[in-house]
Image (cartoon, helix red, strand yellow):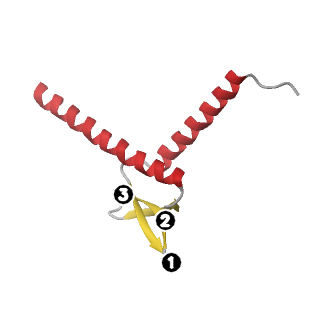
Amino acid sequence: MKPIDLMYQTMLAELGQRSLDAAWTADFPPEGRFTPVTVKGRKYWYFDIADGKGGRTRRYVGPADDPDIAERVAAHKSDKDDLRARRRIVSSLTAKAE
């Protein structure tokens, strides 16, 4: 079997990671929030989001001690904070332009 060139291996790995990131963002949009819930002495992550009918929908994400999930939950919070900051800047700029 012919070995795959390192450049193509790297590109394939990058594509896989970006696809995983895009799926995560689609599944857990910035409008929602992660909530830790303890069940039978173990902590798990759930994701809460408004259902558009005045209520909310809660989805299971995974165990809180999973390092990959914990990293993504932390990144979601920082991305959400950054989104809020960008919205404030845009709001300030548009208010001054009027």
**Residue 98 showing in the rendered view:** no
Residue located farthest toward the bottom when viewing the structure as drawn: 40
The residue type indicated by label 3 comes to Gly
Give the residue at mark 1: 40
| Residue 48 image position (x, y, % from top left) | 40, 60
Describe the element under mark 3 as helix, strand or loop: loop
The residue type indicated by label 2 comes to Tyr
The reply to whether dot 2 and dot 3 touch (C-beta < 8 Å) is no
Which of the two discs, 2 and 3, sits closer to the camera?
A: 2
Describe the element under mark 1 as helix, strand or loop: loop
Classify 56 as above or below 11. Answer: below
| Residue 11 image position (x, y, % from top left) | 64, 26
Tell me the tag on residue 52. 3
Residue located farthest toward the right when viewing the structure as drawn: 1
Q: What's the residue at 13%, 25% (across, down)?
A: 97
Marks 2 and 1, how far apart at CA:
10 Å
In this orientation, which residue lies closer to the viewer: 51 or 36? 36
Classify 6 as above or below 34. Answer: above
Which of disc 3 and disc 2 is earlier in sequence? 2
Taking the image as shown, residue 32 lies to the left or right of residue 90, namely right
**Residue 63 showing in the rendered view:** yes
Which of the two discs, 3 and 1, sits closer to the camera?
A: 1
Classify mark 3: residues with Cα within 10 Å, few (<14), some (14-19) or many (20+).
few
In this orientation, which residue lies closer to the viewer: 45 or 91? 45
| Residue 76 image position (x, y, % from top left) | 41, 47
Give the residue at mark 2: 44
Quarter placement of the N terminus: top right
Quarter where residue 49 is shown: bottom left
Q: What's the residue at 54%, 57% (across, down)?
A: 66
The residue type indicated by label 1 comes to Lys
Marks 3 and 1, how far apart at CA:
31 Å
